[in-house]
Structures are given as C-alpha cells and as structure tokens.
Amino acid sequence: LRMSSRPNSKTSPVHYTVTMSPQADTIPIINSLKNSTPSVVLLDRNNEFKVSTTLVGYDSKCKILKFSPNLYEKTNKTGTTRYNLLASSGNENGSVAVWNTKRARPLFNAAGIAKTFINDLAWNDDGMGLFAVSDDGYMYVFAFQEKELGQVLPQEETVKLQASIKKLEPLPTEELKPLHDIKPKSSGGSSVN
C-alpha cells in the first residue's frame, strides 16, 4: 500500500515515540545497553521501579516502542502466564520487532521490510494486528493469530490491574515563589530579609 510520493527519502525521525503498558505498571527505558548490546529495560512500577525484564535483539537504537492496548495470557504445562506485547522499530534498516514482556528475545522480527525508517507503529484495538508506516510512504500490516500471541484478556482485567497500581505521592502543593522574590544569602551564611 503506497501512502505518499516521497521517493526513497532517507530522513531519520528525530523524535522518540514510547508508550506505557495498558495497566500502567511497566515503564520502558529505551536505548539501554546490556553487555554492550542495545536493549530496552522495563521497570516495574509496583516493585520500586526495579528492572523486571531487559529486551535484547536490536542492531541499532530504538525510536518507536508501542505497547499493545491489551493484556495476553498463555497456558502451558507449568501454568498460566500473563504478559504484555510490545512492538518496536527505530533503526535504518526498516525492521519491526514484537516482544512478549516475559521473554528477553523478540517473539517476531520482520527484518528489513522497508527500505527506509519505520516512522510509526500502531496496534489495532483487538491486539491482533499491527501497522507500520515507513518513511518512504508504505504501510505494512501484520495480522497475528491467537496461537502466535496468546489469548487476549477482556478489558475488565486491564481495568482491575490499573486500579491495583500503587499510587505515587502527589507533588507538594505549596505555591512556588517567583525567582525575583528569593533573596540571596550573605557571605556570612545568614539570610538577608
């Protein structure tokens, strides 16, 4: 599908697009390093912002990182696992990767699908489709099946998890003084009023 007529543009996106998990408990830190390998670190807001997972598998810096709007679940012999899915891109080789947040390596990697940068990514509402738009005007559509990504949980599960998130303390509500109202301290260490 052709989106525009900008032939072979090599313009690098200068912005970063990063989203949080739909239940608001995972904060991604892009362009980290793990043993000199580019990675994305996921911080757990419910565990004092400690690293919960490190996603590796980039060959360049990440510019776009989008969480799916849904939570997923898979059941196997050892039990049931809940997780998020992330889609990312950002290097000049036009690749798109999808991660399960419980695994360090990509679940899916479409290497070099575009001849230019991927400028944006978007998940569809049901979490089974991903759209990528490249700098040269093409849109790529990825359609997944439940056996590939897992079962999409009802939106009520996400709302329950959002309600269970530890709330951060609000910032102080004291009115800040304008800088011109602050008096400098004298050299003797006592304040001048």
Image (spheres, rainbow, N blue to C red):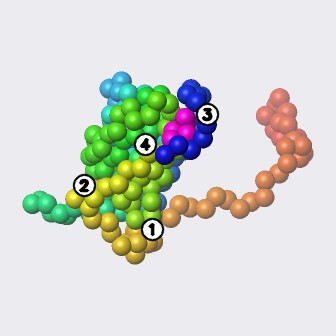
Which residue is found at the position 55% from the left and 35% from the top?
Answer: 136
Disc number lying in front (1 or 3): 3
| Rendered location of residue 18, percent (x, y) | 51, 46
Q: CA distance from mark 3 to mark 2?
A: 35 Å
**Local secondary structure at mark 2:** helix
If you read the primary sequence from the N terminus, does the residue marked by circle 4 or circle 1 appear first?
Answer: 4
If you read the primary sequence from the N terminus, does the residue marked by circle 1 or circle 2 appear first?
2
In this rendering, does residue 67 appear at all?
no
Callout in the foreground (2, 4): 2
- Assess whether residue 30 is covered by the magenta stretch: no
For badge 3, the amino acid type reads Arg
Asked if disc 1 and disc 3 are in contact, CB closer than 8 Å, the reply is no
Q: What residue type is disc 4 on? A: Ser
Disc 3 and disc 4 in contact, CB within 8 angstroms: no
In the picture provided, is 100 more to the left or to the right than 5?
left
Residue projecting furthest to the bottom: 156
Camera-near label (4 vs 1) is: 4
Mark linked to residue 148 = 2
The span shown in magenta is: 133-138
